[in-house]
Amino acid sequence: MDAQKLKAKRALRRQRRVRKGIRGTAAKPRLSVYRSNFHIYAQLIDDDAQVTLAAASTGSKGAKVAKGGNIAAAKLVGKAIAEAAKAKGITEAAFDRGHFRFHGRVKALARAATEAGLKCTGLEEAAPKAGKPAPADVKKDGGKKEAKKEGGKKPAPEAAK
């Protein structure tokens, strides 16, 4: 099989696997993301009515980006789709990454949309875990380094009685 056909077949399989569990409604539409080499596109889709509720992209007339194929442009599109959702009264969306990995531009778009008020990722749950400080008084090595420093040799095992 041709390499490009195989690549397209794998991408279609990934896309179907991802979309299998995602269904957009009017209350919680599907936030679909498409990433090309030069642009990134986002749509809020109501699958029940088969209607696109809002859309934003780097290729649209109102986009204020010089290049659309970078993370900064993806963040702007994420903010724009969140503002369009707020105007329609939508606060929550099911994130659909399609066949793209949740990494780089796709991740930046999702995080920017969540930070702008459209809850579509688990960013709120992940924030408290990152801020948890590690206890400073607990030693990881169990005090073995101190014993080595004292005599330069390993501590002698206790004699069995």
Image (spheres, rainbow, N blue to C red):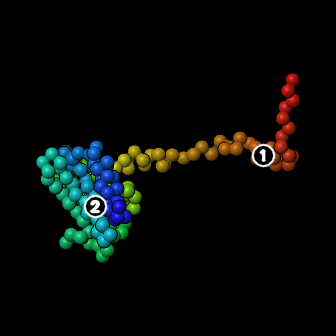
Q: Which residue is mark 2?
A: 34
Q: Which mark is residue 90?
A: none
**Residue 85, percent across and down?**
21, 54
Of residues 122 and 40, the one nearer the viewer is: 40
Query: For this view, does 4 lie left or right of residue 136?
Result: left
Asked whether the viewer can see residue 10, the reply is yes
Q: How many marks?
A: 2
Of labels 1 and 2, earlier in sequence is 2
Secondary structure of residue under mark 2: strand
The residue shown at (17%, 48%) is: 47
Q: Which mark is residue 146?
A: 1
Q: Amino acid at mark 2?
A: Tyr
Query: For this view, does 142 lie left or right of residue 37?
Result: right
**Residue 23, percent across and down?**
23, 45
For the residue carrying disc 1, how many other residues have a C-alpha within 10 Å: few (<14), some (14-19), or many (20+)? few
Of residues 21 and 54, the one nearer the viewer is: 21
**Residue 79, percent across and down?**
28, 61
Instruction: Name the residue furthest bottom.
Output: 66
**Residue 31, percent across and down?**
25, 53
Q: CA distance from mark 1 to mark 2?
A: 56 Å
Q: Amino acid at mark 1?
A: Glu
- From what the image shows, is residue 9 above or below residue 160? below
Secondary structure of residue under mark 1: helix
Q: Which image quadrant: the N terminus?
A: bottom left
The residue shown at (80%, 44%) is: 147
- From what the image shows, is residue 124 above or below residue 66? above
The residue shown at (81%, 46%) is: 148
Q: Which image quadrant: the C terminus?
A: top right
The residue shown at (49%, 49%) is: 131
Of the two numbered discs 1 and 2 in the rendering, the one whose residue sits closer to the viewer: 2
